Image (cartoon, helix red, strand yellow):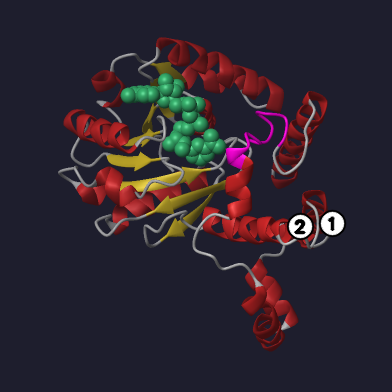
């Protein structure tokens, strides 16, 4: 992939990590944020990550923070937005960005769940716009979902897929702009049933997590569900579905049990209790465990 000029708009948790990945891949990256503190800390955060991961620290020289939006995006071949999850904010920002970029510059949003179609509907050249859904932390989780809308051109999708693959990511093409894209639909189908099992008194929250982590969770990183279905046979999968699916939670709204936790202020780590109780030490230990696991997986991929 030829060297590209990338602009990252939003220098928070996701933005600084996305900038890091592209800089490490050899691209020149400008980064913009409307909040000076975020912009000023971006390079320090990236440098700390590069050091921690043992990556080439010279990559930091390719990152340029710029506090002026027209200047930050004006020369870019590709702009990715990672500002707060707020539809009017993102809509207005893209209309603004479009005024300053070249005709062919590709525009991407890193929204978690807002439809890309909604974010991009105000653009004059909607064929150059798409979604790129990164996962946190961007420099450790390989997947980037590349979401096209009804207007996105094949060329914009192709460029974006190649850009991310060449930067060491695993891009996945999402051909329709559906809520949750692919990853969060799958993840939350599982979470819905996990919550229903607790709600129905079949087991407690700790047991749900234990069953997943000690059984199919062990295989998931190397054996996807459809590979697994083929491995055991589609006939067996059909037989299992005939028995199990009628009993699995299929309510098209959040669980009342989840709603009651939120109403009671049981918000998880942030309040010390959610499905389970969490001391500060337990929270820190779990965060560390996840980080170490992701770092190990990245080292194994390399
Ligand atoms: N955190 C995650 O795990 C995750 C994962 C995937 C996608 N996302 C999505 O990525 C986006 C960013 O999330 P985050 O976690 O990095 O949030 P964050 O709060 O860490 O960062 C958002 C940044 O946007 C900046 N900002 C706000 N208004 C702006 C404006 N008008 N112009 C420029 N910058 C502005 C803020 O100053 C802040 O630095 C959101 O859309 C979020 O849904 C987050």
Contact between labelled residues 1 and 2, with CB atoms less than 8 Å apart: yes
* Res. 214 mark: 1
Residue 270 lies in the magenta stretch: yes
- Looking at the image, can residue 16 be seen? no
Query: Residue 292 vs residue 261: left or right?
Result: right
Q: Position of residue 291 (x, y in %)?
A: 72, 34
Residue pointed to by mark 2: 217
Quadrant containing the C terminus in the rendered view: top right
Q: Quadrant of ligand 1?
A: top left
Helix, strand or loop under label 1: helix
The magenta stretch spans residue 8 = no
As measured in the structure, the alpha-carbon distance from the residue carrying label 2 to the one carrying label 1 is 6 Å
Residue shown at 36%/53% (left/top)? 157
Q: Quadrant of the N terminus?
A: top left
Judged by its main secondary structure, the magenta piece is loop
Q: Nearer the viewer, residue 162 or 68?
A: 68
> Dot 1, crowdedness within 10 Å: few (<14), some or many (≥20)?
few
């Amino acid at each position: 992939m030829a060297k590209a000029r990338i602009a990252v708009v939003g220098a928070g948790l996701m933005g600084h990590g996305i900038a890091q990945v592209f800089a490490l891949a050899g691209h020149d990256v400008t980064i913009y944020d409307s909040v000076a503190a975020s912009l000023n800390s971006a390079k320090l955060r990236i440098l700390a990550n590069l050091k921690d991961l043992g990556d080439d620290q010279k990559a930091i020289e390719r990152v340029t923070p710029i506090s002026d939006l027209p200047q930050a995006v004006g020369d870019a071949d590709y702009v990715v937005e990672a500002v707060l999850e707020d539809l009017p904010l993102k809509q207005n920002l893209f209309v603004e960005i479009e005024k300053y970029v070249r005709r062919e510059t590709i525009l991407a949003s890193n929204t978690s769940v807002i439809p890309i179609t909604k974010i991009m509907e105000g653009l004059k050249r909607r064929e150059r716009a798409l979604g790129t859904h990164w996962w946190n932390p961007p420099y450790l989780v390989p997947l980037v979902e590349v979401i096209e809308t009804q207007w996105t051109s094949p060329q914009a999708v192709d460029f974006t897929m190649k850009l991310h693959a060449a930067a060491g990511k695993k891009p996945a093409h999402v051909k329709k702009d559906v809520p949750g894209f692919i990853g969060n639909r799958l993840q939350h189908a599982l979470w819905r049933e996990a919550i229903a099992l607790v709600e129905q008194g079949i087991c407690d929250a700790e047991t749900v997590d234990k069953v997943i982590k000690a059984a199919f969770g062990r295989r998931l990183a190397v054996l996807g569900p459809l590979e697994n279905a083929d491995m055991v046979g589609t006939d067996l999968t059909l037989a299992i579905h005939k028995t199990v699916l009628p009993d699995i939670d299929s309510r098209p709204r959040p669980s009342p049990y989840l709603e009651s936790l939120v109403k009671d202020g049981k918000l998880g780590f942030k309040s010390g209790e959610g499905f389970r109780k969490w001391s500060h030490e337990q929270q820190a230990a779990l965060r560390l465990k996840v980080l170490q696991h992701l770092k190990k997986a990245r080292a194994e991929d390399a």
